[in-house]
Image (cartoon, rainbow, N blue to C red):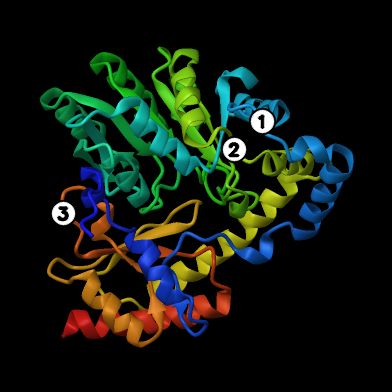
């Protein structure tokens, strides 16, 4: 049978990370590949209590269809949280998503026509590339340094290209772990206003700061309603619930609601009510602080071990939060070759090239520090250091 798929099917490949994760399911593999939270920190008993309370008190409602925008109680909590970060909104300005990843797909539906120019950081979040690619845009990129997207590079592209949308991961960026500086956050809004461009600020990691000072979201500097803000409960609560949210101006938000209705009608009612009940009955701040403490310790240990075991010429970022750090090897060293050698030692990571829209990054790779316990971090990074020394020195 000759199956006639849509043209977009040929443009989309399975995420390289997902393919790598299949290999890392073997228990002997020390995996620094996936962006997985530490499962031992999931609030299992509190979740059990929240589930029981929801089913006992509102079971029929929890198992019924709901409104597309999301449960009002959960949206109210989200709005109050964002107000505390300088984003002026209310429950009507928020939509609950089936994970913030859904927000990226909906962005494609709402904004991207074939051939539209989408600007990303270089490198950028791999799943955003795949989400947008289904709508056949043309990608361009702006360079980064330790303070995030370089505004001179951004403006240079804006002058040359009819950019429709800027996508940025503002805090502890995936994959580099870098955070955009305060001045650059103000500047990116200024440039978006000047060149009439939409900004999608994706901020799944912002709550996970364990060093340095917090920086206000780009959305807090939005003067014309052109910044769309995405975030998630996955990194501070439980990724299996698939709960995220979007905040945007009324005009833009209404378009997202229409397309979400056609996509999944609404996000799981039961999950929303469980989350709302957990937030009512338990201390989310205490839980987030516990996550920060564990992840900060694991990041510190990973960096210390890398400094002790990685060969000269290998550079890496020092993130102040999040889940990832970024490694750059000397030019001419291919991270796929290093990955193959590391897998012989049962060590996994994600090669860097798929995070670039321009074919660069063959000498880079991403490491996750949140998921592995400390003894496995030391063992895995020490073995990786030996592999890197062998590959680089020949």
- Residue 55 placement (x, y as % from top left): 83, 45
Q: Which quadrant of the view contains residue 367?
A: bottom left
Q: Which quadrant of the view contains residue 317?
A: bottom left
Q: Who comes first in sequence, dot 2 or dot 3?
A: 2
Q: Residue at x 24, y 70 (%)?
A: 335
Where is 119 relative to 87, above or below?
A: below
- Look at the numbered discs 1 and 2 and tell me whether their residues touch, using CB distance below 8 Å: yes
Disc 1 to disc 3, C-alpha distance: 43 Å
Quadrant occupied by the N terminus: bottom left
Residue 366 seen in the current view: no
Name the residue beneath numbered marker 2: 267
Q: Residue at x 38, y 24 (%)?
A: 186
What is the crowding at mark 1: few (fewer than 14 residues within 10 Å), some, or many (at least 20)?
Answer: some
Residue 156 seen in the current view: yes
Q: Who comes first in sequence, dot 1 or dot 3?
A: 1
Disc 2 to disc 3, C-alpha distance: 36 Å
Could you tell whether 233 is left or right of 153 in the image? right
What is the crowding at mark 2: few (fewer than 14 residues within 10 Å), some, or many (at least 20)?
Answer: many
Q: Secondary structure at mark 2?
A: loop
- Look at the numbered discs 2 and 3 and tell me whether their residues touch, using CB distance below 8 Å: no
Where is 249 relative to 345, above or below?
A: above
Where is 88 relative to 314, above or below?
A: above
Q: Nearer the viewer, residue 217 or 117?
A: 117
Q: Nearer the viewer, residue 176 or 304?
A: 176
Q: Which quadrant of the view contains residue 44?
A: bottom right
Q: Nearer the viewer, residue 61 or 73?
A: 61
- Residue 221 placement (x, y as % from top left): 45, 20
Name the residue beneath numbered marker 3: 359
Q: Secondary structure at mark 1?
A: loop
Label annotation for residue 66: 1
Quadrant occupied by the C terminus: bottom left
């Amino acid at each position: 049978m000759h199956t006639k798929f849509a043209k977009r099917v040929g443009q989309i490949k399975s995420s390289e990370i997902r393919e790598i994760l299949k290999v890392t399911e073997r228990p002997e593999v020390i995996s620094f590949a996936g962006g997985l939270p530490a499962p031992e920190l999931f609030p299992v008993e509190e979740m059990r209590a929240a589930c029981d309370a929801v089913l006992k008190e509102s079971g029929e409602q929890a198992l019924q269809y709901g409104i597309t925008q999301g449960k009002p109680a959960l949206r109210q909590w989200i709005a109050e949280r964002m107000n505390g970060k300088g984003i002026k909104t209310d429950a009507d300005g928020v939509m609950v998503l089936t994970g913030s990843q859904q927000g990226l797909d909906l962005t494609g539906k709402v904004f991207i026509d074939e051939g539209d120019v989408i600007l990303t950081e270089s490198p950028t979040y791999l799943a955003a590339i795949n989400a947008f690619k289904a709508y056949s845009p043309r990608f361009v990129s702006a360079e980064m340094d330790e303070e995030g997207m370089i505004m001179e590079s951004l403006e240079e592209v804006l002058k040359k290209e009819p950019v429709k949308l800027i996508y940025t991961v503002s805090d502890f960026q995936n994959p580099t772990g870098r955070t955009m500086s305060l001045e650059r956050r103000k500047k990116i809004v200024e440039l978006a206003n000047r060149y009439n461009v939409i900004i999608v600020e994706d901020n799944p990691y912002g709550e996970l700061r364990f060093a340095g000072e917090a920086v206000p979201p780009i959305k807090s500097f939005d003067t014309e309603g052109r910044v769309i803000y995405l975030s998630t409960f996955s990194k501070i609560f439980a990724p299996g619930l698939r709960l995220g949210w979007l905040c945007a101006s009324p005009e833009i938000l209404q378009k997202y609601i229409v397309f979400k209705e056609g996509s999944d009608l609404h996000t799981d009612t039961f999950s929303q009510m469980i989350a709302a009940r957990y937030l009512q009955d338990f201390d989310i701040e205490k839980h987030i602080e516990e996550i920060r403490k564990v992840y900060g310790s694991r990041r510190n240990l990973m960096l210390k071990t890398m400094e002790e075991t990685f060969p000269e010429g290998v550079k890496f970022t020092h993130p102040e939060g999040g889940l990832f750090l970024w490694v750059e090897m000397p030019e001419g060293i291919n991270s796929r070759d290093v990955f193959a050698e590391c897998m012989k030692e049962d060590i996994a990571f994600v090669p860097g090239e798929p995070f670039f829209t321009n074919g660069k990054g063959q000498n880079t790779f991403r490491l996750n520090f949140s998921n592995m316990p400390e003894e496995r971090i030391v063992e895995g990074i020490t073995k990786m250091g030996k592999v890197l020394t062998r590959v680089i020195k020949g």
